[in-house]
Image (tube, coloured by chain):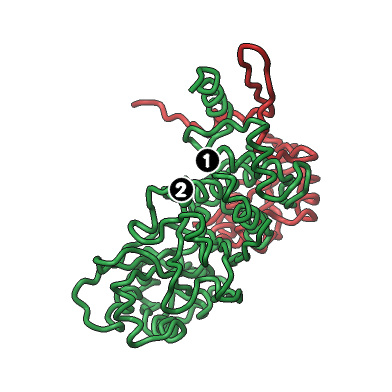
Amino acid sequence: MAEKTNTLNSRKLPIAQLISCGDISCELLVDPIPRPAPEPITVRLKPKQSRVVLIDHHKPNSMTILKLTQTILRQRGVEVNDQILVKDDASRPMTAAMLNSLSQEGGLVLCGISD
Amino acid sequence: MAYETLQDIENCMDNGWSDGLPVIPPYGSLVDEMLSAMGWQATDVIGEIADQNIIVRAEKAAATAVMAGCKTQYGPLLRSLSKALLDPKFNLGGVEVTTGGAAVLVIVSGPIVEQLGFEHSANALGPNNRANATVGRFAQMMRHFCGSGGGVLTPHGTVGHPGRLSYCIAEHPATEWGPYHTQYGLPATASAVSIMSAEGPNSCNNHYGETGASILDTIGDCMNHYGQTAWYYRSGGFVVVIPPDHMALVKEQFSREQAAQYIYDNARRQTDDLIKAGRIAKDPTSYAEVEEHSLRSPLKSLDQLSFIECGAEGGRFSAVIPRWVGSQQVVCMAIEDV
C-alpha cells in the first residue's frame, strides 16, 4: 500500500523578502503578507505532566464526546481534570486570558473535538 | 515580457507569495501607484487582526491588489473592500482556516458597476471579465495573506470551493427591488461593496413555473436540502440570486420583503426528519433552538436572507448561496471618491 503523505506538514512559510534583479540593478518586491508581532506562541508536543485537560470548543456534540473521552481515559488510568473548559465560539480563537492560563498548563490540552 | 519578469513571477509562486495562480510581481513602482489610487500612504494602519497579533498596513493591501491584477481605477473600491475585509465583524482569520471551506463573497452594487466595467449579466456568478475576476481574487488573496497568521496557520477546509480563488458578483445597475446595499441601510444612490463568507452557489432551475410563488418555492426547496450547513446553527443565512426571467414572475406577486417572508414561512423541514438524517447534534446547543416535532427553517431570522438581481435574460435559473455559519455578519461599505 502506498504511504500516505501530508502536504500540509511539508508546507514552508512564505518568504519575508524577494529581490528582482535585472541586468543593471536590483529592487525589493513589496511583501504582501503581514507578519505577527510578537511571533506566535510555540506548542510543546510532549506534555511535562501526565494529565489531560479537555476543552469543549462549542461545536455540535463536543461536550458529549469529551465526557465520553474523560470516562474512557480514566478507565485506562490516565489523569483527567474534572472540569471540562468551554470556549464560547468555535469560529474564533480562544480569549487571550484562556490562552495565557493554558500556556501554564503542564499536561496535554485537548481542544477541537466534535463531530 | 522580459525573462527577469517571468523569473520574478516564478519566485513569487515558489516562495508563498501567491494564491496558486501566477501573480503580477509587486514592484515598488506599481505598488506606489496603487497606494495613491487607494488614497493611502504605505505605512498607514488599515486594520488589525488582534487574535493573530497582526497589524495590516496599507502597502500590504496595495501589493495584493497589484498581484491580483487589479487596475488602479479600482482604487476607491479596493479601499472600501480592504476596510470591510479587516473589519473584526468579518472574522477574516476564521474564514481562512475553517473546515467549512468558505470563501469571501464580494457583491458590488450601484453606479460603480458600470463605471468600472463589471459584468452583471451573462454568467454573472463567474464571468470572464477583468473587474469581477481581479476584485474577487484580491479579496481571496487578502483572506489568504492576512488571515493565516503570516503563513503559520493552516487552512483546514474539508473540500472548499472554486470561489476561494475569486468570488465577486456585480448587481444590475437598474433593479426591480432597489440596489443590494439598501438591505444594509445604505441609500439607493450609493455605490457599495458588501462582503460575507460563503459556500459555493447552488443553481435553481425552474423553466415551467407560471407564478412567482412557484419560483420562490423552488428557491426555498434548494435552501432546504439535507446537506445544508445551516441546519444545526442557523447562523449564516443565504443570498438569493434572481436573474430577469425569474424576477419577471416574482415581482408580479412579491416585494423584496414579501418574498423573504414567503420563503421564511414556507421553506421548512420536519425537525424529526433532520434528527433522523443526522443533521441535528445529539446534544444541541441552546443557540441552535431545536424543537422536536416541529417544522424547522434554515433561517434563524428574516434578516439572514438577502436578494441580488443579476444574470442574463433568456434562461429560467436562479441561485442560492449559503453563507458560512461562523461569520454571521455582512459588512457593507459605501465606496467614496479618493
**Colour of chain A as rendered:** red
Residue B331 position, x and y percent, is 61, 65
How busy is the neighbourhood of tag 2: few (under 14 within 10 Å), some, or many (20 plus)? many
Q: Closer to the camera, B252 or A64?
A: B252
Of the numbered discs 1 and 2, the one sitting upstream in the chain is 1
Q: Residue at x 60, y 58 (%)?
A: A91
* In the displayed structure image, the side of residue B242 where residue B57 appears, left or right: right
- Residue B69 numbered tag: 1
Viewer-proximal residue among B105 and A70: B105
Residue drawn at (21%, 71%) of the image? B207
Can residue B145 be spotted in the picture?
Answer: yes
For the residues bearing labels 1 and 2, Cβ distance under 8 angstroms: yes
Q: Residue at x 52, y 65 (%)?
A: B111
Mark 1 nearby-residue class (10 Å; few <14, some 14–19, many ≥20): some
Amino acid at dot 2:
Ala
Would residue A28 appear left or right of B97 to someone viewing this image? right
Which residue is label 2 attached to?
A: B133
Q: Chain of mark 2?
A: B
A108 is higher (above) or lower (below) than A3: below
Q: Secondary structure at mark 2?
A: helix
Q: Indicate the quadrant where residue B31 lies.
A: top right
Residue B261 at x, y = what percent? 44, 85
Q: Indicate which disc residue B301 carries.
A: none
Q: Nearer the viewer, residue B287 or B338?
A: B338
Q: Which chain is green?
A: B
* Mark 1: amino acid: Gly
Residue B328 in picture, x, y percent from top left: 58, 66
Left or right of residue B245, residue B306 in this image: right
Q: Chain of mark 1?
A: B
